[in-house]
Amino acid sequence: MFSMKPIGYVRSPHKQTQDVPKGLGAKHEAEGILEILPEFALGLTDIEGFSHLFVIWAFDRSEGFQLLGTPPSDNRPHGVFATRSPRRPNPIGLTVVQLLHRNDTRLGVRGIDMLDGTPILDIKPYLSNVPPEQLRRGWLAEAEARSSQVDAT
Amino acid sequence: MFSMKPIGYVRSPHKQTQDVPKGLGAKHEAEGILEILPEFALGLTDIEGFSHLFVIWAFDRSEGFQLLGTPPSDNRPHGVFATRSPRRPNPIGLTVVQLLHRNDTRLGVRGIDMLDGTPILDIKPYLSNVPPEQLRRGWLAEAEARSSQVDAT
């Protein structure tokens, strides 16, 4: 077992789960603040040089897990490890955000899909891309294709 | 505090830290296996449709943390949240791997930079890219530029 403690908290315009855009084509353009605890301030040295960050956080308002579930973006069930469901064996969330500005221990970011008050576990620089021509998006591409067929009728 | 438990383990050709390629231009082409525990098998449903996965794992052989440190890719210190140092406040690692094949609960992947036996905490589908023209790579780009100046002399 590994014990994780918050290094800070997310300040988000999303106050409850239903505020977060979900489903196919959902865009995460919301801006918010990553408030890092003062004791970890030194760990932010040079972070402003990166345009994008990985934020690893805890689904603190999710209980238990479900190995098979139907996500908002499809009407068919998929394995939890093939989705971003909050009901995971370890309640870890991962979001790529764009870093807009830094004010001491407050990082202004765009692309927030977390709830206000979400505990942050780690921040890492986002470095690499997978070339688009090598990327396959599994059931999500299929769900999008089915959805656009419905739209077209 | 959040308690995390392994959902499986990495089988890697890297048996010790010095086996993992490090520093500027290090390539992670190593192939290995993500062995998921049988009790979580159902959570892998449909995972084979994705070309790339996020693997979230635990630095189980790292002790304590260092907020400012000099990474193998530079000769200047940077904040831990601006590096991939193992000595983090929460010992969480993150790797994007390419999924090559699936055999029941064994996922064959390329891009392993974890040690053999590393506990896996979560797997998520890799979905989105940041457009290359929007990506800034902070001190790492600067370290690369300095390194190529040295190479050119």
Image: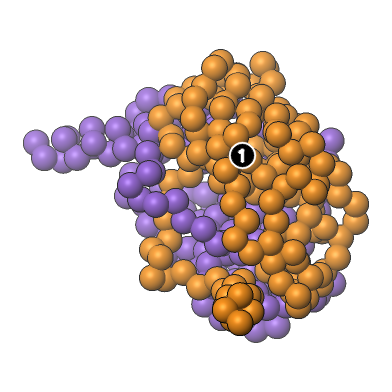
Chain colours: A purple, B orange
Is the residue B47 above or below the residue B132 in the image? above
Residue closest to the eye, B118 or A4: B118
The three-letter amino acid code for the residue at tag 1 is Ala
Q: Position of residue B133 (x, y in %)?
A: 38, 70
Quarter of image, res A7: bottom right
- The answer to whether any part of residue A112 appears in the image is no
Residue B13 lies left or right of residue B100; in this view the side is right
Q: Element at badge 1?
A: loop
* Image quarter hosting the C terminus of chain B: bottom right
Residue under the point 28% across and 39% down: A144
Mark 1, residue position: B30
Point 23% across, 36% down: residue: A145
Count of numbered labels shown in the rendering: 1
Whether A108 is drawn above or below B65: the answer is: below
User: How many neighbours does mark 1 have within 10 angstroms: few (below 14), some (14-19), or many (20 or more)?
Assistant: some
Q: Position of residue B16 (x, y in %)?
A: 82, 41
Q: Viewer-proximal residue, B149 or A5?
A: B149
With A151 as the anchor, is A21 left or right in this view? Answer: right
Q: Residue at x 81, y 70 (%)?
A: B69
Residue at image point 43% right, 46% down: B127
Front residue of this view, candidates A149 and A63 = A149
- Location of residue A45 with respect to B85 vertically, above or below: below
Q: Is residue B121 left or right of residue A52?
A: right
- Residue A39 location in percent, x, y? 84, 72
Residue extending furthest toward the right: B63
Residue B8 visible to an observer of this rendering: yes
